[in-house]
């Protein structure tokens, strides 16, 4: 009987060694050189389904090995749904760790200063992140605005221009909350200086949105803000074209005299004194700061475009009229 024991043990040992090698090999990265691919874990996917999909995508050598590893590490129920950037150069342990931690693929989203909420909503839709209609519904939700602790009945003016990164499926509500949270971070250091000037959050945002639309030259923002503050302090109308345009439904790009004389347009600052009823765009940090910290030495009450991205500033109407003739009518 003993003469059979050694051969049997030898066979068992060989089988164990071979099995161990097979398992170890199955738990190595399939390739030494490979591009990353997008792999999606659908909501409600089982461990087995994920393992089979990984094998079919060439990301793991054997589904059974990945599934066994997940169960051994007690992470079988921890895999999170979402899009992932994975590579066949990663080991099953590395892939499992990424899926269990929910290290999903994110998508960048950015927009420049001075866009309206409608324009930002369109960009959300174009990026495939959310429907424009859903974004605008949130923007105009007074209860939502109140919950986010901003002044006013909607979020126009509080959608802060910045670069964001989100995973697919985050949801429009969470993304809009992020935009407003960035505004609040930018507003925090400006709150006290604004209060010292007697300006509320809403007033600063409204005026900053006008400054943003009036000039693209960074160095001019404090001067433009000073001009409008000078006019307000003297009881003069702001007479700013971008505000009038904001209040014109389906504006065709041609501002006419009839528009400037339309007193029914609540944003017509040629007819209605003071600030318009709300922001006309979403300003960035520089425009917000320009309103709170304007050019204190600026005595101008007027400015006109020089058609090169900058403006000519005037203290008197006579000087302004000459500048208009020079820069807008081609007279010298």
Image (cartoon, helix red, strand yellow):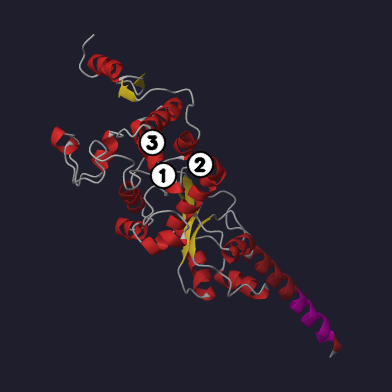
Specify the segment rendered in magenta: 3-13
Task: Read off the residue under disc 3.
Answer: 212
Residue sitting at the far left = 258
- Say if the magenta span includes residue 10: yes
Residue sitting at the far top = 332
Q: Position of residue 131 (x, y in %)?
A: 32, 58
Q: Which quarter shows the C terminus? A: top left
Task: Read off the residue under disc 2.
Answer: 194
Q: Position of residue 134 (x, y in %)?
A: 33, 60
Task: Read off the residue under disc 1.
Answer: 203
Q: Earlier in the sequence, mark 3 or mark 1?
A: 1
Q: Identify the residue at image location x=54%, y=74%.
A: 47
Marks 3 and 2, how far apart in space? Answer: 18 Å
Q: Secondary structure at mark 1?
A: helix
- Foreground tag (3 vs 2): 2
- Nearer the observer, 129 or 290: 290
Q: Is disc 1 surrounded by few (<14), some (14 to 19) or many (20+) residues within 10 Å?
A: some
């Amino acid at each position: 009987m003993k003469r059979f024991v050694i051969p049997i043990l030898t066979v068992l040992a060989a089988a164990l060694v071979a099995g161990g090698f097979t398992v170890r090999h199955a738990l190595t990265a399939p390739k030494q050189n490979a591009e990353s691919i997008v792999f999606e874990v659908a909501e409600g996917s089982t461990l087995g389904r994920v393992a089979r999909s990984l094998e079919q995508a060439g990301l793991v050598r054997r589904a059974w090995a990945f599934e066994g590893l997940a169960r051994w590490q007690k992470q079988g129920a921890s895999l999170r749904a979402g899009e992932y950037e994975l590579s066949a150069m990663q080991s099953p342990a590395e892939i499992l760790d990424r899926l269990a931690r929910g290290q999903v693929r994110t998508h960048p989203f950015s927009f420049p200063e001075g866009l309206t909420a409608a324009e930002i909503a369109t960009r959300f839709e174009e990026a495939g992140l959310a429907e424009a209609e859903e974004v605008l519904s949130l923007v105009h939700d007074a209860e939502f605005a109140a919950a986010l602790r901003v002044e006013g009945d909607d979020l126009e003016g509080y959608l802060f221009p910045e670069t964001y990164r989100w995973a697919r499926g985050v949801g429009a509500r969470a993304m809009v909350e992020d935009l407003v949270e960035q505004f609040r971070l930018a507003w925090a250091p400006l709150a006290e200086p604004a209060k010292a000037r007697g300006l509320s959050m809403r007033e600063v945002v409204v005026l900053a949105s006008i400054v943003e639309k009036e000039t693209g030259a960074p160095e001019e923002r404090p001067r433009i803000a000073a001009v409008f503050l000078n006019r307000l302090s003297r009881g003069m109308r702001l007479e700013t074209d971008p505000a009038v345009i904001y209040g014109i439904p389906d504006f065709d790009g041609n501002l006419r005299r009839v528009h400037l004389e339309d007193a029914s347009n609540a944003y017509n600052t040629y007819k209605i004194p003071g600030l318009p009823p709300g922001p006309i765009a979403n300003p960035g940090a520089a425009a917000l700061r320009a309103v709170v910290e304007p050019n204190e030495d600026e005595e101008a009450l007027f400015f006109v475009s020089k058609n090169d991205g900058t403006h000519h500033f005037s203290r008197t109407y006579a000087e302004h009229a000459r500048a208009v003739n020079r820069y807008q009518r081609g007279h010298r």
